[in-house]
Image (tube, helix red, strand yellow):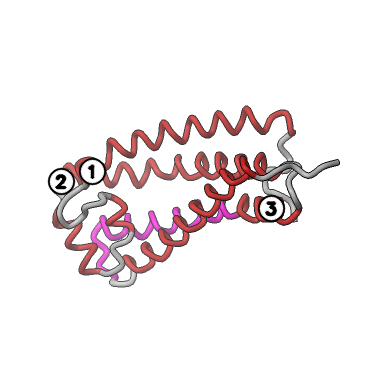
Amino acid sequence: MNHPLEFVSRAGRKPLFFFFLAFTVVIYGVFAFLDTPLRTTAAPSGIVSYELAGTFENSQAILNSWDENARLFVAFGLGFDFLFMPVYALALSLGLILAGFEKPKPYQTLTVLLGWGAFIAAGFDAIENYALWKILAGDLSTSLPQVAAICATIKFILLIIGLVTAVAGLFIKKTSG
């Protein structure tokens, strides 16, 4: 199996990585700003509390803790996240292909799998956001918070494992030859 960004020239990988990494940091900063009015007693972690609510009751308690302004921030953030998804997936996947270059085969295989995992995480993020949007729009389906929480959990696991693996590449010696 090839890395999803194998087609990117070796010379182009590092500049693209830094571009998408910088873009990721900027967008994350916007999200940090948007998250400020979302931190309430019912949602101490802001939007992450909403993503991981898991039950209809919890999601409704979070929504009830937000005023109209906060709900607008949520709506904007959910839409804006669709820009963020390909950006963070490209940054992480490029970081993984760079980390795996000329490294031992088992590590290289892991970076390839997690390179795909970055895009799979973005797919789960999209499903999660759709479920959260439906809840915000008033859909009373009791399964939507659970769908969002499962997708968010898978997304976070894939991204954290990918990030740890990419950083670990800084400490793994290149293969000789």
In the rendered view, does 30 fall on the left or right side of 105? Answer: left
The label shown at residue 142 is: none
Q: In the drawing, does residue 148 fall left or right of residue 108?
A: left
**Residue 100 lies in what quarter of the image?**
top right
Estimate how packed mark 3 is, as few (under 14), some (14 to 19) or many (20 or more) residues with alpha carbons within 10 Å.
some
All told, the count of numbered labels is 3
Tell me the mark number nearer the camera, choosing from 2 and 3: 3
Highlighted magenta segment, given as a residue range:
117-141
Whether residue 118 is in magenta: the answer is yes
Residue contact at pointers 1 and 3, CB within 8 angstroms = no
Position of the C terminus by quadrant: top right
Percent across and percent down for residue 151 are 43, 62
| Vertical side of 141 occupied by 65: above or below | above
Residue labelled with disc 2: 68
Mark 1 sits on what residue?
72
**Marks 1/3: CA–CA distance:** 43 Å
Query: Marks 2 and 1: CB-CB under 8 Å?
Result: yes
The residue to which callout 3 is attached is 107
